[in-house]
Amino acid sequence: MGYESLTQQNPLRVLNMGRDNNQMGLVVARAGLGKTALLVQIALDAILRGRRVIHVSIGQGIDKTKAWYDDILQLILNEHSVAHPHELIEMVACHRMIMTFQAASFSRSRLEERLNDLILQDIFRPNCLIVDGFDFSSANREEVEDLKNLMEVMNLQSWFSATRHRDDTRVSPAGVPAPCHEVDDLFDTVVLLNPQKDATIELEIIQSSNEQLAGSKGLKLDPTTMMVKER
């Protein structure tokens, strides 16, 4: 697609994000620490690698989600020299679709129905699914397993976000905090966002399909731009 230099310079390359199908990733953080910003950067990385992304936003409108893409894409264009920026903007718009759900209406069956409608009508065929806002605190293991099965059936790489709460200290043996401490084994990669004293937000890779990356803390979110940076 002609954007190899952008993907090579992207700090997310160390996570091999956007490459393998049928893998599930998870971003865990307290509210307001940058989960959506990170998911959008994951989605853009996948698009720049030639994939088509559906961003499922639960409990948030299309305009707000689209604004995240517009802002982060503009920051990328400000940092990197792109010969025809308008072509990149158009390409991202063509390779991304935003799908919204009310929290009470989201389920595997409704998601599958809407995805199949798009695919069967040859409207949009995704390779990657971003699910932002799924309520893990009220979901049981069977529901998460059901979503994992859907990703496998549809041959989709997927990334989910989960909100942790300060007063809930439960944690899995692998170090994954509640509310995902009992379903962490269903995910190939888990990234925890940790606020630091210097106001940056550290990305801790708690578990990864690449064993050498497990426990890595080499990335951070810039608190001003919410862009992923290398230390």
Image (tube, rainbow, N blue to C red):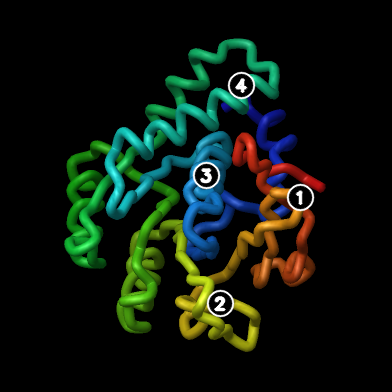
CB within 8 Å, label 2 to label 1: no
Badge nearest the viewer, 4 or 3:
3
Q: Is residue 165 above or below residue 67?
A: below
- Disc 4 residue type? Leu
Disc number for residue 198: 1
Residue designated by label 2: 177
Q: Which of 191 and 108 is in front in this view?
A: 191
Q: What element carries label 2?
A: loop
Work out whether mark 2 precedes mark 4 in sequence or the reverse, and give the earlier one: 4
Work out whether mark 3 precedes mark 2 in sequence or the reverse, and give the earlier one: 3
Which quadrant does the N terminus fall into?
top right
Work out whether mark 1 precedes mark 4 in sequence or the reverse, and give the earlier one: 4
Looking at the image, the residue that sits furthest to the bottom is 173
Badge nearest the viewer, 2 or 4:
2
Residue 147: image quadrant is bottom left
Q: Is mark 4 on a helix, strand or loop?
A: helix
Residue designated by label 3: 37
Residue designated by label 4: 77
Q: As drawn, is 178 to the left or to the right of 83?
A: left
Marks 1 and 3, how far apart in space? 19 Å
- Disc 1 residue type? Asp
The picture places residue 150, in percent across and down from the top left corner, at: 33, 67
- Disc 2 residue type? Pro
The picture places residue 231, in percent across and down from the top left corner, at: 82, 47
Work out whether mark 4 precedes mark 3 in sequence or the reverse, and give the earlier one: 3
Disc number for residue 79: none
